[in-house]
Image: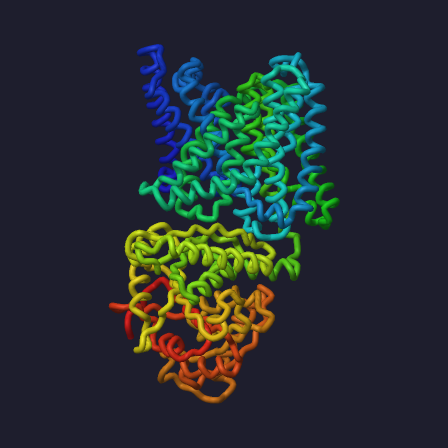
Amino acid sequence: MVIRGRRLQPAIWAVIILLATATAAGAEAGKAAKPSEFILLAQIALLIAVGRGLGELMQRVGQPSVIGELLGGLLLGPSLFGWLWPSAQAAIFPPSGEQKALIDGIAQFGILLLLLLTGMETDLKLVRKVGRAATTISIAGIAVPFVCGFALGEFLPQYLLPHPEARLIAALFLGTALSISSVKIVAVVVREMNFMRRNVGQIIVASAIIDDTIGWIIIAMIFSLASRGTLDVMSVAQALLGTLAFLAVSFTIGRRLVFRLIRWANDNLMSTAAVITVILLLMSVMAMITHLIGVHTVLGAFIAGVLVGESPILTRQIDERLRGLISSLFMPVFFGLAGLSADLTVLKDPSLLALTAALVLIASIGKFGGAFAGGALGGLTRQESYALASGMNARGSTEVVIATIGLSMGVLSQTMFSMILTMAVLTTMAMPPMLRAALSKLPLGQDEKERLEREEYEQRGFVANLERLLLAVDDSTNATFAAHLTGLLAGGRGLPITVLHVGAPAGLAEQNRGDEQSHEAAVINAARESAKADADGGGNVDVLTRAPEKAAAEAIAEEAKKGFDLLVVGIDEVADRDGGFNKGIDELTAGFDGPLAIVAARGAHQQDPTANPRKILVPVSGSNVSRRGAEVAIALARLSALPLQVVYVSTTRDKGARRTSTSMSLAREEAILKDIAAAAARYDVNVATTLRANTAPEVAILQEIAASRADLVVLGTDRIQGDSLNFGSVAAAVLGKSKVSVLLVSDGEIRPKT
């Protein structure tokens, strides 16, 4: 009895809050005719509380949270609350135009933010990867239901149309609403089911992305047509050409401009919300541009989101803050208002109920059949096509936005809006169980299994999670070699690099400008070479060169605050006579707490610092830092024709451990070598392995350098606590005695002395 009472407490409190809000709203509404801030706050609070609460409940039963937000609006609207207690519902959500305009303004801005978020979730690399199949599926999946919806619109009874003379526009809106999948709903459901990285999951999401993009272009065209009232070929052509020009400029000049603005805000503005401010301004400006060319603002917001999502320095923290703001405030308000605008009580009319059922049936069969046919044409199996068609049938947020636009323009009637909203809710709720059933029957192929293992490996890895690199160099040969290695690391994924020229005295900045340009060229050329070895790579790295006016150590400490993942140092003098690091290295790295890479060019790389390493050696010991060094070595070895040489060495921590010559004692060492070899195989890098477990690690490494004829040693090291930079005795010995180039890669954590 007590347990049941506790479960009922939230519902009891919800009723009490609703009653109190209704009473207060009624009293507030009677005071004055002007818009009330109290009523606005009451509306927002109820929409957020009910929408987010039901969204949480929906997620617990395997449905997307947007369904709960829509249902929240339906419950608070005329469908339930207004039916049970009309006066209270009218007091909280008064029909007066001025009061309604306040919450509508928030909802309209919420539409733009929702489209910004949808664009940010759009993965163009994914679209390019499965482009042929996704494009075929998307076109077939749009064409079939669009024709069905358009035909239905042409035969709708006149009483369902607010303007029967504009039947063409209404039919176009209906065809679009039935044909477009919601990329947000599709992506959320596929991700929650852990099928985002499956082949068919990627095709589903990529097809939904193309669906959404085509959908917003179609809506932009229809909006232009509807706002002019007639089918003016010249006006439509003008809007179409304007849209194409907008897209062309956005994905060329606009892409670079957006990235540079976000980078400038991140690097130069002190406020923690500076990047979010710039993103919101970009969204607003691009939305206004699309409005000026005669198409709807949602297209500008969507494209702004795509460009923002592609920015390589959009940090996870900024991304989560922006998503949190949109998900917690604007989405429940917008979808709640959409539910408020629908009146499901009209469906008690048998003819309207039958028409709504026909609408849902036509939408589902048309989308399912079109996507299934597209999958077959795209080369998918029957099982894959079935899973794909099941996933593409979710409408959700996109249809709600489209229907809301049609309602606000007077193209759709209130009854028609309620019917489309019902269709969106039912198709979205049917999608997760259908997709689960379809995907559970799909076998995992060998190629797909290998790709999934590689991606799982990368999620835990170091190199795959780098986002920004800071390169500190002077005018030496070693600096050019460091620039070349940095370009090889960055080129595979097109990472932005900031080159800090730390070797120029204050009065010689002009003289060293040529050196800065040569380092930049070394980075760019190496990045292009690296991109050729990576099928998913970008190669077009953005390089920003700076000659700091203040002391080099201060400049690096200041740059470190901007969110760099790795500092690469390449200066003339690296090691001192005692085997440690040169004082210059020590000063440069003092203010950087993250991972470090110290470069020392030797041998052939002193003669030609832009030559790719021919033979790379990486010592491993099973520790996390040695694995990090192995990851860097694998990334660099993709351009080498010779196998990567991996040698197992004992660490200084292994002293005193029992060593025998039995095969049993070497099982661990052999397992570590096999693990590194498997990691290299994921990137098509050949490996040669050697065991030197019974020799001091520094001796073993130097012996292997001579035996393998390597020209670069990549060594993962600990960063040991102390007054100066210290990577330990093994790193010091290798750096001091190696006659070939050395790359030392340290962890960001500082380990205490042992």
Camera-nearest residue between 557 and 460: 557
468 to the left or right of 2: right
223 to the left or right of 554: right
The colour style of the image is rainbow
Outermost residue toward the left?
A: 723
Q: Quadrant of the N terminus?
A: top left
167 to the left or right of 639: right
Camera-nearest residue between 645 and 104: 645
Camera-nearest residue between 193 and 11: 193
**Residue at image x 41%, y 33%?**
329
Outermost residue toward the bottom?
A: 661
**Residue at image x 63%, y 58%?**
448
Q: Quadrant of the C terminus?
A: bottom left
Residue 409 horizontal/vertical position (percent): 55, 18
Residue 288 higher or lower than 66, as above or below:
above
Residue 497 horizontal/vertical position (percent): 44, 54
Camera-nearest residue between 484 and 426: 484
Asked if residue 71 shows in the view, the reply is no
